[in-house]
Image: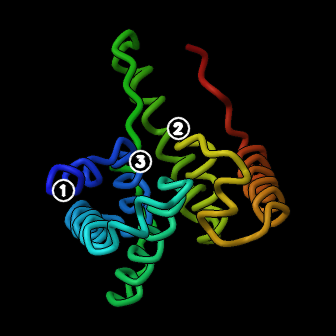
Amino acid sequence: MQTDKVSILDLPFKDKLFRFAYNIVGNVQDAEDIMQELLIKIWNRQEQYSGLDNKEAWCMTVTRNLAIDKVRSRKINTKDIDEFHHIRDHDHTQDKQMEADESLKFVMDLVNDLPEKQRMIIHLRDVEGYSYKEIAEMLDTSLDFVKVSLHRARKSLKDELLKRNFKKYDT
C-alpha cells in the first residue's frame, strides 16, 4: 500500500503545474509551497484522487485555487513573469539577440497587462497547450467564455502591437 501512495505523488505533469502556479504567484518560493500543498491534498485524498478520470485537470484546478489564495493573502498584484519566459537562440548575433530579448520583454509586458483571466487563458492555451475544453474545466467556466476570452486577449495583443508599430524580427 505504501508504494501506491508514492506513485500517486509522482506526477508526470508536475512541471506544468509548477509553471502555472509560478505564472500566478510570480515567485519560485510561493510556487514551490503551492506544489507541496497540492501533494499534501493528493496524499490526504488518495482514494478520491485515484478515482478521478482527469487527474491533470483536477490538479490544475487545485493549483489555481491555491495560487489565487496565496496572492490574495499577500494582497500584492503579481504581473511580472518575464523571468519565467526565456527564449534563447544561440545562432543570433549579440545585437540580434538583444533585439529579440527586448521584443520578448515588450510582448510579455503586454501579456502581463491583460486582465487576470485572459492572462491565465493565454498561458494555459499558448504556453501549456491545453485544449479549450480542458481550460474551461480547470477554470470552472464555460467553453464559450474561454474562446471569447482567448480571442479578446489575442486581439488586444495584436492591436497594441500594431499601434506601436511592432515588427517581428526575421530569424
The amino acid type, in three-letter code, at marker 3 is Lys
The amino acid type, in three-letter code, at marker 2 is Ser
Kind of element beneath mark 1: loop
Looking at this view, is 17 or 6 the one in front? 6
Residue 157 in the image: state x and y as whole percent: 71, 51
Q: CA distance from mark 3 to mark 1?
A: 28 Å
Q: What's the residue at 58%, 56% (across, down)? A: 111
Name the N-terminal-most of marks 2 and 3: 3
Q: CA distance from mark 2 to mark 3?
A: 25 Å
Kind of element beneath mark 2: helix
In the picture, measured across the screen, residue 111 lies left or right of residue 66, that is: right
Give the residue pinned by disc 3.
Answer: 16
Name the N-terminal-most of marks 2 and 1: 1
Give the residue pinned by disc 2.
Answer: 103
Question: Is 158 placed above or below 79 here?
Answer: above
Residue 151 in the image: state x and y as whole percent: 81, 53
Please give the label number shown on residue 1: 1
Looking at this view, is 1 or 43 the one in front? 1
Please tell me how crowded label 2 is: few (under 14), some (14-19), or many (20+) other residues with Cα within 10 Å.
some
Name the N-terminal-most of marks 3 and 1: 1
In the picture, measured across the screen, residue 47 lies left or right of residue 159, that is: left
Residue at the front extreme? 1
Q: What's the residue at 52%, 38% (across, down)? A: 103
Please give the label number shown on residue 62: none
Identify the image quadrant of the N terminus: bottom left
In the picture, measured across the screen, residue 65 lies left or right of residue 30, that is: right
Q: Is there a contact, CB below 8 Å, between mark 2 and mark 3?
A: no
Residue at the top extreme? 91
